[in-house]
């Protein structure tokens, strides 16, 4: 006869307290298959940046959070729109939650970049909309957004739409106070947990502190708010425009065409080895960043 397990005879609390550590402490050999897969995934998984010269040095893997920081007016959102077009051309589903621009404004800029010119034709806009159907979604809300609502949007995008990349533009619209360090830390902790649990790659736009010298290339330590934003992020990028060159061009002064118009700086890449500056040039008509002074805008829709 089988022995009975009586509820009143056993200290269940003691077992509940001990069971979790026991389950989580494992032999190293238990992770062998995952270890092998990690080396394979490091180089071949995740979407790449649209500039061919970067290659596999930067990848945007599932379950990560990337912070895109920059000085106000240096083109963070514009560059990120082009990066999203690159993801879409790699057949990755994307969503943009811009709390600073209406969806039609975002689409206006992205369609101009995709058209490789200043004024897309009506036929191209139709092609762009058709191509974007099933590749791009936009969350239509401007102004402040509650952290819990943003978390719900992220989970919905992952569970119902099978989206791989979500852009949140920007942190200041999620956490109202620049000095609300605990709120920023909690929001980053929540976003990293959601990314890990759902497989989303979350892109968070953030701002750099004001500096007396806008011509100085900033870094991750110049980001506004809590240091936990960069600490918890998997990747940190800084977008910087060469405003001195831009001003000289507007004034008709001679400029060196080989001098970059902008830099995308990879300040941190937790699961990759590359960190450094990527020089880019701005093609004004298409609003694209290109890889060289003599490069033409890139084609996304094929």
Image: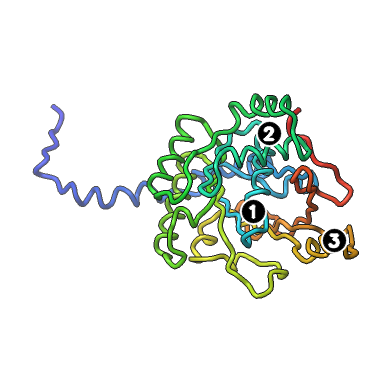
Residue 194 location, x and y as percent?
Answer: 45, 45
Distance between the Cα atoms at labels 3 and 2? 30 Å
Residue at 59 percent of width and 68 percent of height: 222
Is disc 3 placed on a helix, strand or loop? Answer: loop
Mark 3 or mark 2: which comes first in sequence? Answer: 2
Judging by the rendered image, the residue that carries numbered circle 3 is 259
**Image-quadrant location for residue 118:** top right
Rendered image quadrant of residue 298 = top right
Query: Taking 18 as reference, is 43 left or right?
Result: right
Q: Secondary structure at mark 2?
A: loop
Disc number for residue 76: 1
| Residue at image mark 2 | 90
Mark closer to the observer (1, 2): 1
Callout 2: few (<14), some (14-19), or many (20+) C-alpha neighbours within 10 Å?
some
| Label pair 1/2, CB-CB below 8 angstroms | no
**x%, y% of residue 67?**
57, 54
Q: Is residue 72 above or below residue 41?
A: below
């Amino acid at each position: 006869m089988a022995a009975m397990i009586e509820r009143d005879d056993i200290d269940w609390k003691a077992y509940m307290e001990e069971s979790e550590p026991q389950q989580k402490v494992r032999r190293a050999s238990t992770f062998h298959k995952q270890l092998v897969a990690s080396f394979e995934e490091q180089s071949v998984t995740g979407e790449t940046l649209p500039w061919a010269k970067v290659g596999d040095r930067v990848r945007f893997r599932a379950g990560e959070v990337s912070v895109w920081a920059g000085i106000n007016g240096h083109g963070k959102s514009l560059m990120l729109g082009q990066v999203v077009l690159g993801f879409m051309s790699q057949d990755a589903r994307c969503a943009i939650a811009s709390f600073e621009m209406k969806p039609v404004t975002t689409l206006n800029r992205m369609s101009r970049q995709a058209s490789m010119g200043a004024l897309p034709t009506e036929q191209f806009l139709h092609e762009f909309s058709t191509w974007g159907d099933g590749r791009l979604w936009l969350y239509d809300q401007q102004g402040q957004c509650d952290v819990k609502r943003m978390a719900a949007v992220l989970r919905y995008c992952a569970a119902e739409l099978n989206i791989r990349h979500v852009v949140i533009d920007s942190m200041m619209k999620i956490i109202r106070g620049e000095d609300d360090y605990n709120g920023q830390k909690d929001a980053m902790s929540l976003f990293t947990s959601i990314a890990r649990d759902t497989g989303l790659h979350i892109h968070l736009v953030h701002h750099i502190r004001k500096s007396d010298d806008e011509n100085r290339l900033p870094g991750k330590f110049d980001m506004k708010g809590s240091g936990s934003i960069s600490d918890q992020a998997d990747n940190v990028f800084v977008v910087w425009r060469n405003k001195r060159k831009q001003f000289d061009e507007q004034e008709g002064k001679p400029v060196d065409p080989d001098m970059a118009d902008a830099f995308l700086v990879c300040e941190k890449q937790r699961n990759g080895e590359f960190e450094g500056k990527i020089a880019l040039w701005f093609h004004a008509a298409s609003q694209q960043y290109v890889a060289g002074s003599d490069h033409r805008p890139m084609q996304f829709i094929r």
